[in-house]
Amino acid sequence: MSELESLLAGYDPEVRPPVLPASDVSYVVEDTAIGRMLLAADASGALVASTFVPDDPAEAHAVERLSRAISPRVLRHPRELDEARRELEAFLNGRSHRFTLRTDLALATPFQRVVLPRLAATVGYGHRATYGELARAVERPSASRAVGAALGANPLCVVLPCHRVVAASGALTGYAGGLAAKEYLLDLEARESGVDDPR
């Protein structure tokens, strides 16, 4: 009997391979200086969400999105987000100018996966860019509106700094956390960085 025949002879169609358990997504909801935010990390510890959830329905929607996109097991585990909470608090209080957290753009669209890393790499603390400038930076000069939409749905608010992008006139435009939160962040960075001209 050949090796293949031996393997087939032992095959039992009723035996199924074990189903691996779903990996947990841990999350916590924090009241911050700029509003109520949900932070979430995947099983590897990478931050996958930093988003504004002003009320319970918004929180439920964010949790549902995590369960659809990453894992059905989305659990409130504050201790798993301790480092993210510390870094966010330090940033919002001006004690830190950068994040060292590992991140994963699992919730991002393909276009966001181009725009957001470029934003983080090119627009530093205390600086600003326009939607048009960022569109040109990703070699899509006519895509200012698409860039705006990508930033408006940023799954990693503050950590990937979409608040640093403004209108061509310099005016503050839409932000997921509201214009007051955007103004707070820009004023904080201007004060702490000492940058004379944010542009």
Image (cartoon, helix red, strand yellow):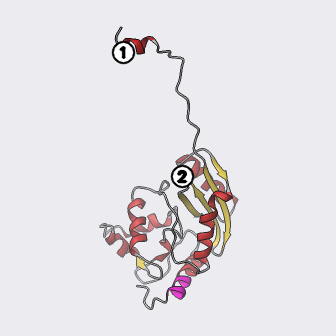
Residue 49 visible in rendering: yes
Q: Is residue 146 visible?
A: no
Residue type, numbered disc 2: Ser
Are there few (<14), some (14-19), or many (20+) residues within 10 Å of tag 1? few
Secondary element under disc 2, as helix, strand or loop, is loop
Relative to the observer, which residue lies in front, 194 or 72? 194
| Whether label 1 touches label 2, CB < 8 Å | no
Residue 36 point in image, percent of width and height: 66, 67
**Prevalent SS, magenta region:** helix
Q: Quadrant of residue 184?
A: bottom right
Viewport quadrant of the N terminus? top left
Magenta stretch: residue 11 in it?
no
Name the residue rendered at 41%, 59% in the picture. Answer: 113
**Image mark for residue 4:** 1
Which x, y percent locates residue 101? 52, 64
Please tell me whether residue 4 is drawn above or below residue 189 in the rendered image: above
Q: Which residue is mark 2?
A: 44
Q: Nearer the viewer, residue 149 or 195?
A: 195
Residue 150 lies, with reference to residue 181, above or below; the image says above
The residue under the point 47% across, 15% down is 11
Q: Which numbered disc, 1 or 2, marks the residue that appears first in the sequence?
A: 1
Q: Amino acid at mark 1?
A: Leu
Residues in magenta, as a range: 187-193
Q: Image quarter for residue 94?
A: bottom right
Q: Nearer the viewer, residue 150 or 72?
A: 72
| Crowd rating for badge 2 (residues with CA inside 10 Å; few <14, some 14–19, many 20+) | few
Residue appearing at x 68%, y 59% in the figure: 78
Residue 190 sits inside the magenta stretch:
yes
